[in-house]
Amino acid sequence: MRRLPTRSLAGLAAIGLLALTGCGTETGGSPADRAADADRTLRAEKVMRLTEVHEQTGMTLLEGPVFDEDGKLLVVDVTAPAGEPKVLRVDVRKKTAHAFHTDDRGTYTSAQFSPYDGRIYLTDFSHGDIVSLAPDGSDPRTFFSGEVDGARMNPDDLAFDQEGNLYISDSRGMSEGEEKGRVVRIDREGKDATVLADDLASPNGISFDADHRGLWFSELTQNRVSYLLLDGEGGVASRHTAVRVDAGIAQTDSIAVDADGNLYQALHGRPAMVVYDKHGERLATVEVPGRAAEGLESATNVAITPGGTKAYMTVSGPAGGYLYTFDALAEGIRQSNGG
């Protein structure tokens, strides 16, 4: 999720949100063969339009795609006003979508299922809360609320470790343009919150690597991806800048990781993603081609079908909120399914 334009902030203020700034199969050779063709362009194809610009907020912004156990895709609409679907459930085969959840408060920027309790967790950017729902969308609960080390979060994206503990990109300071962001760990009971990294420039995307040894996270206003090597006891062993993203006017948004460890870095300001291997080599650019890109400003996130290579990318702009699809370089895993 990213900083919103001035015209959109005005719309959000009107509804009290001013705090916000099917399985595929592999084709065309093995993942290794396809990845060998460095920095090629992957053309994304339109699946369907999910949303139109909301009159109350002046925009629509799709995020956090995640497949449920039935193979349906859940997608959040960050700027949906009260009463309109804030989470949609999409049948990508039939190209149909239905309301999954709404409320009168949340500004949800990401979604992911917990491996611990099977519930779906949502980050509420405006209010600093983590909310969970039953798999069918019922039984909403506030999992975490309040301050972390004396400051309330602006939680953007999230990732789970294998035990069900949460790792949050906290974009605190985004609206002021200050480097106050953090990476926060919350234990699976929602009782213990720990800051793993701070003084960050609007951290946005966050994902475990393929082996769950460390975390990749992006900083929106610095266009860089960093790596946190974890110590296995809830702390950090080391941290370094891993990738500097040359994106021109675009900025680094959410991150997904496939079974080969490749990073899919979404771009705010361009309907595209860039793909890197775990060593930082740029492998490919995913693009909405030609005239189809008109009226589309950002590709925020992607979900790759678990065990398959069919990828579904959320793309938004004045033309509305869309799903686009492309063939990923490797199979989808938990790290490429939500967050």
Image: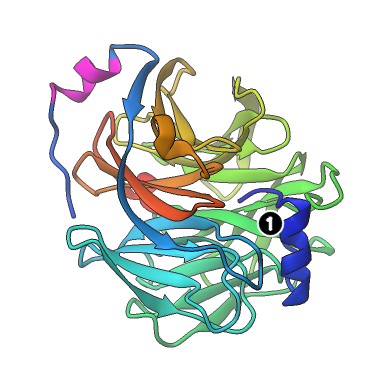
> Few, some or many C-alpha atoms within 10 Å of disc 1 (few <14, some 14-19, many ≥20)?
some
Q: Is residue 117 above or below residue 293?
A: below
Identify the residue at the far bottom of this view.
139
* 255 or 209: nearer the viewer: 255
Image position, residue 216 (x, y; %): 53, 36
Position of 2 compared to 206: left or right? right
Q: Is residue 125 magenta?
A: no
Q: Is residue 112 above or below residue 270?
A: below
Q: Is residue 147 visible?
A: no
Which stretch is magenta?
28-35
At x 46%, y 37%, the residue is 293
Q: Is residue 38 visible?
A: yes
Image position, residue 117 (x, y; %): 38, 72
Position of 191 compared to 338: left or right? right
Position of 106 compared to 119: left or right? right
Callout 1: helix, strand or loop? strand
Image position, residue 185 (x, y; %): 61, 55
Q: Which residue is mark 1?
A: 194
Position of 302 compared to 270: left or right? left
The quarter of the picture where residue 282 lies is: top left
* 144 or 316: nearer the viewer: 316
Q: Is residue 272 above or below residue 235?
A: above
At x 40%, y 38%, the residue is 292
Image position, residue 13 (x, y; %): 78, 70
